Each structure stands twice: as C-alpha cells, then as structure tokens.
Amino acid sequence: MNIPKITISPRPNVGKALLAGGAVLLIVAALLAWSYDSTILGDLSISGNPAPLQEFAIVMGVVGLIEAALVHRRLTSLSWWDTTSSARALAVGTLVYIVLIDYNIAYQSGGVINLDPGAWLALVGALVMVAGSFLLAPVKVTNQLKVHGANWLEIVVITATLAALLFMVAFILRGDDGGSVLAALAAGGTFGVLLFRGGFFTWLSVAAARHRPVIMLGALVVALLFPLTQNGTDANMSIAVDIAIFLCAALGLNIVVGLAGLLDLGYIAFLGTGAYVGAMMSSAASATIGWHPPFLVVALLGALTSAVLGLIIGSPTLRLSGDYLAIVTLAFGEIFHTAVNNMDGTNGPDLTHGPNGIAGIPDLNLFGFNFGSTHNLGSFTISNYSNYYILLVLVAALIITIFSRLNNSRIGRGWIAIREDERAAEAMGVNIFGLKILAFAGGAFLAGLAGTIQAHATPSVVPDNYTFQESSFLLAAVVLGGMGTVVGVALGATVLKLLPEKLRFIEDYRLLIFGLALVLMMRFRPEGLIASRRRQLEFHDEDENLADIVQEEHVDEQKANA
Amino acid sequence: MSTATRRPRDTEFASGKGEVLLQASDVLMQFGGLTAVKDVNMTVHEGEIVGLIGPNGAGKTTFFNCLTGLYKPTSGEVRLAGEQIPPKPRKVVKAGMARTFQNIRLFGNMTALENVMVGTYCRTTSGVLTTVLRGPKFHREEKETRAKAQELLDFVGLGHTTELLARNLPYGDQRRLEVARALATDPKVVLLDEPTAGMNPQETQQASDLIFRIRDTGRAVVVIEHDMRFIFNLCDRVLCLVRGEVLVEGSPEQVQSDPRVIEAYIGTGDDDDFDDDDVQEGPA
Ligand SMILES: Nc1ncnc2c1ncn2[C@@H]1O[C@H](COP(=O)(O)OP(=O)(O)OP(=O)(O)O)[C@@H](O)[C@H]1O
Ligand SMILES: [Mg+2]
C-alpha cells in the first residue's frame, strides 16, 4: 500500500499546474469515444455520452482539480487533509485504472491500434497527473484525530461514506464481464486509497466511535435497503445471500479467533452441523427425521447441537497449548465431512443421504411470512432471495451486537489478557479455560444458528459445501479483513465471496491468488486491512511510535465519550 | 538521599500477633535431580511484612511459584487462612493470595486502568447473558470495577496514568502497576517478587511507603528483595534462603548480624548485594 517516496526536489507550482492540466485532459477524454466497438466494457464508443466507467474517470478528474486547488493549503478547515499524499494516490490509482481499461479494450478488439483517441488522451492525462503529483511538496498536516466538526456534519459525512460504499458494491455486482468488474474495483480502490492517504479514515475511526449508535443503525439500514437496488431480480440477491451466510460465519469465527485468539481450522463444520440439523428436521421429502417443529425450535436445536459438539471438542483440547486446538479442529472438520458423506444407510444410520445430501428443502415460513414468495413494498419488489438476505442481515446484526458487547466487558478484558500473557492472566485470577471454551462453543452456537437458515436459503445441503477449503476461506476473511474488528471482517468476507463470483476467469487461480494475498498481507500488514488498534500493536510490538499514536487516540476517544 | 526508616504501626495489627494467614510446611520442589526448594517452612500473620532474601538461584521465586499454584510442590503443603490451597493459580487468587512477577508481566497493550480491571475478574460475576443483555447488574458492576481500579491506581500513585498503555509507562511505574493489579484481586496475602529491582533510591523509598500502606490495610506482605537496606527497614521478620533451604529466620537485626548470612552471600560472589557499609550508610 505504500507509495514509494520519490526524492525529486519539489516544484509545487509546476506540480499543481500539471495535476490540474492532467485532470482536465482526463475529463475531456472521458467525453470522447474510447473504442469503436460498443460491446466492450459497457459501450465506451459514443462521444459526448460517457458510460459509467468514463463517469468514474470524470470524478477522478474533478477530484484532481480540487486537489490542485487545495495545494497551497489556504483552507484552515482542511489543514488535516494531506493533499500531496492523497493526490499521489489519486494519480497513481487513476493511471492503473486507465491502463486496465485501455488494456481491456485493446485485448478485446485485437490490438492497441484499435484504441480510439479518447483512450489515448485519458492515458496521457493520467500520466501528466502522476508527474504533477510527484512534484508536489510534502505537507505537514494537523492531527486528524482532533478534527471535530458539527455533529450533524459528521453524521452526514459518515452516512455519505456508507452510501458510497453501498453504491460501489451494487455497481460491482451489476458488472457482468470481468473487465468492468476489475475496472470498477480499481476505481473503488483508488478512491479508498485516496481517502486513506489523505487521512480521512483516521478521522473516520474516531468520529465513528463518537457516533457509534447512529452509525450502526445507518449501516443496518443501508444493508437492509440493498435489495431495493436490485429491481426485484434474483441473480445478484442469491450471491448476496451466499455472502451474508459467509459473513455470519466469519463474524462468529471472529469471536473465536479475533477475541479469544483461538485458531479454529474446522469452523465450517459447525455451520454444517446447523445446516444438517435444519435440513433433517425440515419438511422436505428427503428429510430424515420425522419430527418437524417450528423453525425457531429447529434453529435453537441446530445451534445447540453445534455448541455441544464445540464443547466436546474443546474441553479436552483447550486445556493444552494453542497448536493442539488447530490440529484437532482441522481433524474435526475432516471427520465431519467424511461422516456426513457416509451416513447414507450403508454403513450406519441414513441421516444425511451421503454425497447426495438433502435436497428440496422448502422455503422458510416464519409466523406466517413465507420466504419463498415475493412481496411488494410500494413500487419495489422484494424477491425470494431478498427475504433470506434480510433475515441474514438481522442475524449478522445480532452476532455483531453480541460480539461488541462481549468485547467491551469483563469477559472481553479477560480475552485480551489471555492473548497478551496467558500465564500472567491465570495468575491474576482469570478463568482461562472457561473463557476459551465460552468463545469456542459460543462461536459454534452462532455458526449453527446461521447454518439452520442456510439449509432453507440454499436449494440443498450437501457435504461438499463444508470442506476444509471453506474453513480456510473463512479464516482468510477474518485474517485479511482484520481480526477482532467487525468492519474489517465484513469487508474481508464480502471481498472473498464476491470476487470469485464476479471474476469468473480467476476461478482456476482462486486458491493461488488468495494464497498470494495472504502471504503478502502477512508480510506487509499482518493485522489485516482494517485492524483494531490493539491488534495492530500486538503485531507490531516493537513499534513505539505506533504505541504513542494508539495511546493518543485512546485518550482522545475517552475524552470524546466523557 | 533519603533512607527508609522503619515506620511505626498505626493500626491494631501488633507485630506478628495477628492470626496466621499463610502457612507453608515442609515445601519441597524438585526439578528432575535439582532440588530448588527444600523443606521450607514459613508462617505469615495478619498485618505482617515478611522478607525473603538469598543469593541468586536460591529458590525464592520458585518458592513463590509453589505458594501461588504455578508449580505443584513435590511434597509439603500450603495453607491459606487455614484452608489448604488448591494447586491452581486462579483458585489461589480467589482464595486470597496475589503476586507480582520478578520480570514484569503486565498486559502491555492494555491501559493501566484495564490492567487493574483484569485483576478484579475473580471478584466479579457478570456472565455471558448479563453481558450480552446489558442488564442493570452489568452496568453497576462495570461502574464499580472501574471505580475500584481507579482507586487502586490512586493508591499506588498512578492516578494520572489511567488511560496510558502499560507498555508506555516508565519501569518504576510498571512495577507499581503490577502491585495495583495484584491488589485488585482483594488478596489477604500479597507476594512481591523484587518490587524495587531497577528502581532509583527515590522510587525505592516510595515503594517502602507503599508496602507499609498495604500492610496498614490489614494485609500480609511477603517481599523478595536483594536490596538489604530496603528489606531490613521494611520487614518484621526475614527468612534467608540458601540453596533452597532456610538458613536463618528472625528479626531483621538477628538476620543482619548473622555471620552465616554474610558468608552465604560472599560465598556465592554476590557481595554487591550484601555489604555492611551499604546497609548502614546508603549507596556509595
Ligand atoms: N521450571 C524449572 N525447571 C527447572 N529448574 C528450575 C525451574 N524453575 C527454577 N529452576 C531452578 O531452580 C533454582 C532456583 O531458581 P529461582 O528462580 O527460584 O531463584 P531465585 O532465588 O528467585 O533467584 P533470583 O534472585 O536470581 O531471582 C535455579 O537453579 C533454577 O534454575
Ligand atoms: Mg527470583
């Protein structure tokens, strides 16, 4: 993520002029045709009628102009904004974005020769912007943590950020070819890094803490409104449901890994346990248990079964050192997979129908509300999958609430103490074993709960949904996103589940890419994309500077709360 | 240059006349062929300060580990207020004995206040349901915990460090924070393992003062130290441990003048720590 420090002597005025000039070129370019072929990347062929991807380029140009205007830093209210770093991020991101698009056009239409003038002009504009941004002088910024706007303004800004995020996700979901999705990702990434470099997210982290309840509610509303962006179609909603299930599981795993610091390599088996309980007790023709209680009872049973399994595995293992847990959970995941694959009546009870799984599970019916049918909300249609999506978002909200309440409590402090120094924690009277088993079985409980919903939301429950690979993806979502933070894990889960769906061409290289991403992350940012401050410290134990920053932030936060 | 002076007792606890709080009988600790602690007997009364001295490797820390359940003694028994202590650190704390560590073991990435709050863990009861549902009990207990932790920080003189990360505190403050954390467990007996190691004379003076104040709250204190002047000014009774065995036990005056003690120190080449001049006149 680090943009290399270039040590050319700064020429602010030249830099400013180049940045602005490049931005203007970019905007002009966006109004021209980039390709003669209207089928590429959603029609970039009409001059004067910018396609969405060209609109992004216009936004980048406009932001470039704004940055150029801010270079002399006369606006004291923005003295915290790092113009130079953010302008560089913007310029480099824009260049990557344009190169991606140009490459795509050239690739699809048979050669660089087929790029229309607009595409060339955009490239030149981006290059000029890069040159200009690196001539800007480094700036001294005021502490972003101390920025304190009017309450309403802060809430508006944060809400706008959330809305922009929703828009980006919806846009990526709408993309139907790999090229568009990749370009949209590059655009999103550019804006993200721009804000990060400018110092916006540093401010956001404290400001969000100031308005926590409002933000949580806002995020929930945004997530619940998402189906409305889909015009009642199910194509994307089924992906969204998959993501939501994956997210619920990742959030549960986050309690185990992120809070208690336990490495669980077979977590998907707990989701599977819930799903199988849900399927076996559903009223499907192939259900194997004759008793069909209402769903709420089934959900509770599924969660409890999962938790009991967690207790059985956890109680002997959690008394030993951490490595044993990893080994045992790994084995448990495999045993689960093998067991459900074989409980088909040949060698034991016919509970799961073996590899065929339990199919034809009917839609949920909660208090007379049928999840299988569409509902109308004014002029909007809420489809089949949207129903499940909304339920799952509520479950995720529940898990997040449990997570944060546990985190900020006696129990949460106990978990941190265990992660910091297990022996010292024990010598101070913390119930190590009790807290570990609580996290482990509690995590299993939540995964089981999510599993019972999954049974109804997906067409069938089969063993191959619950393999080690799934467990490792869950863990990757938690680790990449940021252990111990809700936002990070939500981001990790969404990215990890969404990208393979949308970028079909990476399907074969999926494992390779994730492996690589993990290795790179471990090297450069082991605390994850969005890290909790404490986790960041744990991973950078020798970094005294960071410790000071964190402390300052913490003191500020306390003041803000007081 | 201040020299710690024996402070008169200002409480009802007359020297050594309180009830017996801690009784270790014939504690033996062997690691394979090595006997680290050999048949040590120690009795500690309410409101008493007992010192434990001895050259490096004498087995002082190991003895503490046996008392606090970190090690299970090979044989012998430890009674706290009449009850045999359970061989689990957590249960020992619950029974009323807390300790600090020779090499500081704070939770570095937690704030000073949070560190002390962890100490109250065994005296609070909010469970999962209370925590998740955030009932009135949760808020009451959380508030009490916070207030108690702050009070303890003030007590050890760290009232200004509440929101600072433990790792950012200066060395001397970290030692005091460990004491506050131990006190948060509401102990009857406090075990301090070299509480003034690495402190300057002024901080050492403050540490004696702090230990007296802990004693004045009715607790018993057992202190391991190499700083003889500190120990002899502080303690009501001193045990000298050599090669795992109690060599001498008695009042500071008795131990101080016992030739065997001096010899034990000089014999191990550890004469920096025990020097008669040092004891009487302060550091050179
Ligand atoms: N877990 C263990 N396994 C093996 N030997 C041990 C163990 N713990 C302590 N010992 C040994 O027991 C002896 C006593 O060590 P201990 O740490 O108790 O000494 P000490 O009196 O605290 O010394 P110091 O003044 O240096 O702190 C040493 O020889 C040490 O090597
Ligand atoms: Mg020692």
Image (spheres, rainbow, N blue to C red):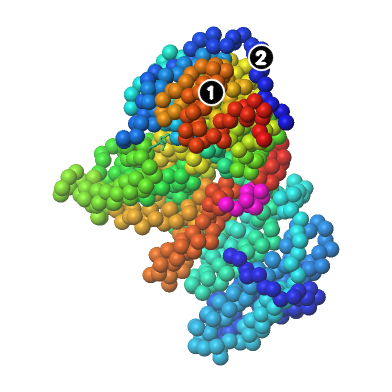
Total residue callouts:
2
Residue B227 vertical placement versus A186 (above, below): above
Chain under label 1?
Answer: B
Decide if residue A323 is in sight here. Answer: yes
Under mark 1, the amino acid is Gly
The image shows residue B180 at horizontal and vertical percentages of 60, 29
| Stretch of the chain drawn in magenta | A542-550
Ligand 1's quadrant: top left
The answer to whether A545 appears left or right of A418 in the picture is right
Residue to which mark 1 is pinned? B51
- Where, quadrant-wise, is the C terminus of chain A in this rendering? top right
In the image, farthest residue toward the right: A74
Is A82 part of what is drawn in magenta? no
Of all chains, the one bearing label 2 is: B
Say which residue label 2 marks: B8
Q: Is the magenta stretch mostly helix, strand or loop?
A: helix
* Residue drawn at x 65%, y 52% as measured from the top left: A545
Give the position of the N terminus of chain A as an image quadrant.
bottom right
Q: Which amino acid does label 2 sit on?
A: Pro
Q: Where is residue A224 in the image (x, y as percent from the top left)?
A: 55, 50
| Relative to A294, A125 lies left or right | right
**Mark 2 CB lies closer than 8 A to ligand 1:** no
SS type, badge 1: strand
